[in-house]
Amino acid sequence: MQKVSPGGKRRMDMTREDFAEVLRRIALLLELKGENPFKIRAYRNGAEAVETFSGDLVTLARENRLDGIKGIGDAIAAKLHELASTGRMEFWEKLRENFPDSIFELFEIGGLGPKKIKALYDAFGVDSIERLKEVCESGEAAALPGFGQKSVAKILDGIAYRESHVGIWRLGDVASIVSEILETLRAHPATSRADAAGSFRRGKETVRDLDFVVATKHPLEILEFFATAPWVAEVLVRGDTKCSIRLAEGIQCDLRAVSNANYPFALNYFTGSKEHNVALRSRALKRGLSLNEYALTPVEGSQAEVPDVFEERDLYRALGLDVIDPALRENTGEIEAAAEGDLPTLVELVNLRGTFHNHTTASDGCDSLEAMAEAAQELGLQYLGIADHSKSSFQANGLNETRLRAQIEAIRRLNETFDDDFQLFAGSEVDILRDGSLDFDDALLGELDYVVASVHNAFQLPEAEMTARILRAVEHPRVTMLGHLTGRLLLQREPYAVKIETIIDACARTGTWIELNSNPWRLDMDWRWWKLARERGVKCVINPDAHRCAELEYLHFGVLQARKGWLRRQDVVNCLPLGMMRETLAAKRLARS
DNA sequence: GCCGTTTTCGGCCCGACTGTTTTCAGTCG
C-alpha cells in the first residue's frame, strides 16, 4: 500500500491518489471501529469517485468546487476541501490517533478482515505484520474465539506470500498466460463456453488476479481439470462451483463453472467492475428485477416480465440498455450513456492505418529500418513513423544532427522502393530538455515529417516546473505530438509530477496530438484522462514505442486503453488513411511554420 | 455518508466458501 502522511505533506504535493488513499484509510479505520457499513461504503465510493473523476480534482477541491460529483457528497467534499487547502483533515487525524499507521498493512493479508484485525488488536495489541507473525507462531492467536489452527495457518501463509510477491501484474505480463489457460479450457470436451472475466477483460492496465468463467454441464469435471492442470502451483479454494489456484508465476486465478443458462450472468458479474455491477443491480431493482450472478428474477410481489437472456448482450437489453463494452464498465457514466443511446462506437485495432513512435538500430532499437518497415506492412499498416532518440538521450544512443540527416535521407530512399500503398515518415523522438527547449534546432526539425517530443530526464522536477517545461514543448510550432506524457513505468516508476489538465488544454489550443503509448509498461497517457481530452478536442495518436518488430503489436494494448478512455475512430489520428495523413502532416507543418 | 421515477428519509447488491461452529460469522469478490 502506498504510504500517505498528508499531515506531513506540503499541500502543493497532494495528488488525487493521496485523496483516494486517505478516503480508503478512513474506511478501513471506520471498519475497525465497527461503524455503520453504509458509511464505510460511502468513503470507499468517494475514493473511487476521486480516482476516476475526469478533471483536475485537486484544484476543484482546493477551490471548494466539488459539488455535483457523483459519490462525493457535502461531507466528503468539505473534508477534501480542508485537505486540499490546508494539507490537513481534522476528522482523519482524530481517527488515526486510535490506531498506529502500521495497522493498515494487516489488511493486505488474505483471510484477515476488519473483525479479526480488531480482535487481534484488542487481545494482543497486534498492529503490524511483524507482531501478527509473533502471535500466530506462539499459538496465542489460535486460542482466540473465532480463530483456530487453520485460520492461523492461513494467515501465516498470507504473510509468507506477501513477503515474496507484490501481488500486482501488468496487463502485458499476463496476456499470454490468459490466452493459454483460455485455450486449454475451451478445448476441454465438457466446456461449452469459456471466457476470461475480471479486470483483465476490462483491459485494466494492471490486474491483481485472473478470472475465468466456463459454461458446462459437468462443473466438477471442469474444476478437477482446472485444479490439477500443469500450471497450478497451489490450490487455494476448491468448491462445487468455484476453484482458486495460484500459478507458479504467483498470480491467483479464479474459475467459476456454471450452467449454460447462468453463463451470461456469471460472465457479466465476474467481469465487473464491482461498481458497474452495483449500478446494474440497482437498475434491475427499479424494474422489479433482482440480478445476481446466476439469473434475473422478479423481486417478491413484482409483476415484472423476465426477458430471455442467452448472451451477455441480452442482459443489457433486458435492462433497457445498449450493450456496454467491457472496457467501459467502470461506472464512469457508461450506464447512463447506454440508457440514452449515447455510447461511443469505440476505436478498434483494425481501424489503425499507421503509427509514429518507433525506434531502429540507429538509436536503441533492435531492428533495422528495413525490417521495421517490412513488419509494419505485414501488420497491414499503410505508414510507419520512425522516431529514434535525439542526441541528449545518449544512454539510448540518440542521434546527433549528422546521423539524423543521414536517417532522413535513408528513409527517403527506402520510400522510393515501396508501392504507393506504404510509406515511412521521417520523425524524431526529440528530448524535451530541462528548460522545455528541444534537443534540435528549428531548421533540422523542419526537415522532418513530424516530431514526437518526450521527457527523458530530470523526472524529479516540481510540478510547476515540469508543467511549464512540457507546455513550452507543446507550444513549439514544430512539435506534432507529445510522447508518454507522465513517464510512468507501471509497478516500477511513479508518473512525474505534471498538471495533466493544463497540458491537455494546451494541446487542444495548439492542435498538438497526445500519444497513447502502448508499451504495456507505460500505457501513458492513462485511460482515465482520455475522455476529458476528447471533450476538449485533443486528438489521440496510438503508438507502440516499438524497439523491435514484434513490439509493433503493442498497438493492441494501446487500442484497449483508448477504448477504456471512450475514444472513437475519429478521435485517433492514426486511423487516417495514408493519403489523408500525408495531407494532415503537410498542413500541420505549413500552419505552424 | 450518499442519494433521489423510493426524492429530504430510509434504503443502500448478494452469494460462495471457509472455519469454527452446532446454526453462523467473517472474508472475498
Image (cartoon, coloured by chain):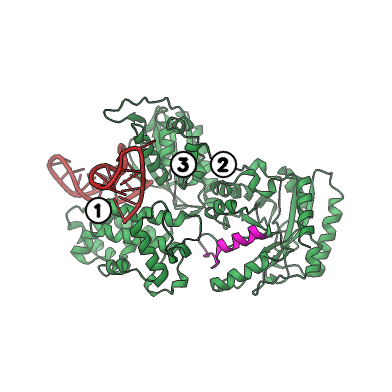
Chain colours: A green, B red
Could you tell me the amino acid type at mark 3?
Glu
Viewer-proximal residue among A84 and A130: A84
Residue A7, percent across and down? 37, 73
**What number is the disc on residue A199?**
none
Q: Is residue A295 left or right of residue A186?
A: left
Residue A342, percent across and down? 53, 39
Which residue is the site of mark 2?
A: A344
Q: Quadrant of the C terminus of chain A?
A: bottom right
Q: Residues within 10 Å of mark 3 (few under 14, many from 20)?
A: some
Vertical order, A432 against A420 (above or below): below
Viewer-proximal residue among A331 and A342: A342
| Secondary structure of residue under mark 1 | loop
Do the CB atoms of the residues marked 2 and 1 lie less than 8 Å apart?
A: no
Name the residue rendered at 45%, 62% in the picture.
Answer: A17
Chain to which mark 3 belongs: A
Residue A493 forms part of the magenta stretch: yes
Mark 2 to mark 1 CA distance (whole Å): 39 Å
Could you tell me the amino acid type at mark 2?
Pro
Residue A199, percent across and down? 47, 47
Q: Which residues are magenta?
A: A492-509
